[in-house]
Amino acid sequence: MDWMLIITTGLAFVFSFVFALGGVGSALALIPVLHWLGVPLNAAKPTGLMINTISMGAASYSNIKNGLLDFRLGLPIIITSMILAPLGAWCSVLVSRNVVLWVFVAFLIFSGLMLLLYRRKGGEENYREDRPVVAPALVGAGAGFLSGLLGVGGGMMISPMLIFLGFNPKKVATITAFVVPFSSLIAFTAYALMGTVQWQVLICASGAAYFGGMLGTKVMHGHLRSATIKIFLGVILLGMAGKMLFSLF
């Protein structure tokens, strides 16, 4: 096993563990890191997307097994995100990618700061327990469209928007983990059909991502408070905004 394969496998485990603490996929961070290490971009993208699928799939398996996933709240998000993702991909050829990235960076900064600075009245006892359809469906539509437009998972949009709507960050993390694999797997399939997948790297990294995602989810539910998850997610969003600003400049 060469050193690049060892490094990629290790990064898949670490990134999947860390991002699972916030219930989001790690492809947006992992893809540029793999590319920086020398993995061709067209091979790094499907690897990152499959790691999203595997790590968040492992997280969802753990959540379902322990009865933590609210299917009724997550289903409208899945349906609308899958419908709008192809439209976003089609629009990606009509809109300047830099314009889209600037808008996305602004959204990440705003969401990250709100998660870090905003405090709900009543604390953790005042989170919503209802299961609306329209608002989550709109969140899923926006996330799906953005996912297709940028070629990344929509978790970075779904999580902050559901938290802003008043849902418990722990519940949000389980829903986001359930939604992300669907859009990521669709995108991965497209790359596989184009023949850009490096299968040896993918298989090793996917195995590591599975265990990383499973472990991160267990730590999140067993040892982190909802407020801690919200802060952690805010830091991730700001970090991603900084990474994207660096690439824009």
Image: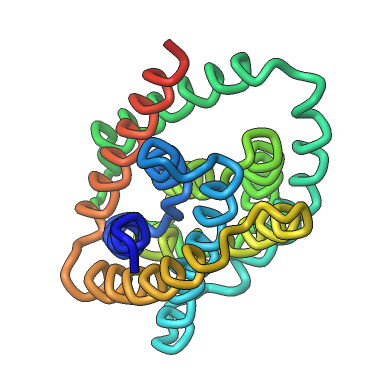
Quadrant the N terminus occupies: bottom left
Image coordinates of residue 15 in percent, x first then y, are: 32, 55
Query: How many discs appear?
Result: 0
Residue nearest the viewer, comparing 169 with 102: 102
Tell me if 112 is positioned left or right of 188 in this view.
left
For the view shown, which residue lies furthest in the top direction? 249
Residue nearest the viewer, comparing 144 with 243: 243
Please name the residue shown 47% across and 67% down the image.
56
Q: Is residue 153 visible?
A: no
Please name the residue shown 32% across and 70% down the image.
212
- Vertical placement of residue 232 versus 129, above or below: above
* Residue 88 image-quadrant placement: top right
For the view shown, which residue lies furthest in the front direction? 2
Please name the residue shown 26% across and 54% down the image.
229
Image coordinates of residue 157 in percent, x first then y, are: 52, 41
Residue nearest the viewer, comparing 33 with 170: 33
* Residue 214 image-quadrant placement: bottom left
Quadrant the C terminus occupies: top left
